[in-house]
Amino acid sequence: MANTLPPKITHLVAGNKLVFLEDIYGATGDATGISDICGIVALGDDPVPAGSESASAQALVKSGILRRIKVRLAESKKIRTVYIIAANAPQIAALKGKKYSTTDTIKTAYFPQKYTFGA
């Protein structure tokens, strides 16, 4: 089975955090619009901004800067994880219909919830 995940590149989160994420966000104002909604910008060949520091996505989720959301893709029917900055979290419904990759669009987006019953 072939790997269908996009390659990982460096992204700029919250203006000064460098995070290594999948290349689905693109640049601000691109055709997909995921970058505008999520608040995450792909650096690509752009120089690293002064004063920025590298961080992991997990550390930013624990500190409350990023939120993890799940998206269901329409064509492949797979579920993928997408990150969104906490300030833009109410805009999660705007992801519906956006392009996840060249072949898939986002069918639904939701916050995952886990429940543990018992001890």
Image (tube, grey):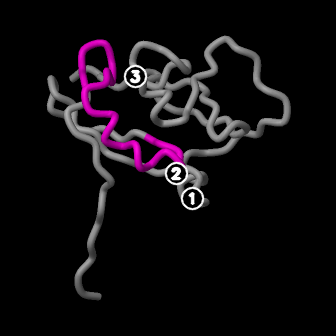
Report the Cα–Cα distance between label 1 and label 2.
7 Å
How many C-alpha atoms fall within 10 Å of the one at disc 3: few (<14), some, or many (≥20)? few
**In contact (CB < 8 Å): disc 1 and disc 2:** yes
Q: Between tags 1 and 3, which lies in front?
A: 1
Residue beneath disc 2: 86
Asked whether 45 or 35 is in front, the reply is 35
Report the Cα–Cα distance between label 2 and label 3.
23 Å
Dot 3: element: loop
Which comes sooner in the sequence, label 1 or label 3? 3
Query: Which residue shows up at 44% across the image and 49% down it?
Result: 89
Asked whether 68 or 88 is in front, the reply is 88
Residue beneath disc 1: 64
Report the Cα–Cα distance between label 1 and label 3.
25 Å
**In contact (CB < 8 Å): disc 1 and disc 3:** no
Query: Which residue shows up at 57% across the image and 23% down it?
Result: 42
Query: Which residue shows up at 24% across the image and 87% down it?
Result: 118
- The boundaries of the magenta stretch are 83-105
Q: Is 48 colored magenta in this rendering? A: no
How many C-alpha atoms fall within 10 Å of the one at disc 1: few (<14), some, or many (≥20)? few
Vertical order, 8 against 14 (above or below): above
Vertical order, 19 against 42 (above or below): below
Vertical order, 82 against 32 (above or below): below
Q: Is 96 colored magenta in this rendering? A: yes
Dot 2: element: helix
Q: Which mark is residue 6?
A: 3
Estimate the x, y position of residue 30 in percent, counting from the top left. 48, 14
Quarter placement of the N terminus = top left
Q: Between tags 2 and 3, which lies in front?
A: 2
Estimate the x, y position of residue 119 in percent, counting from the top left. 29, 88
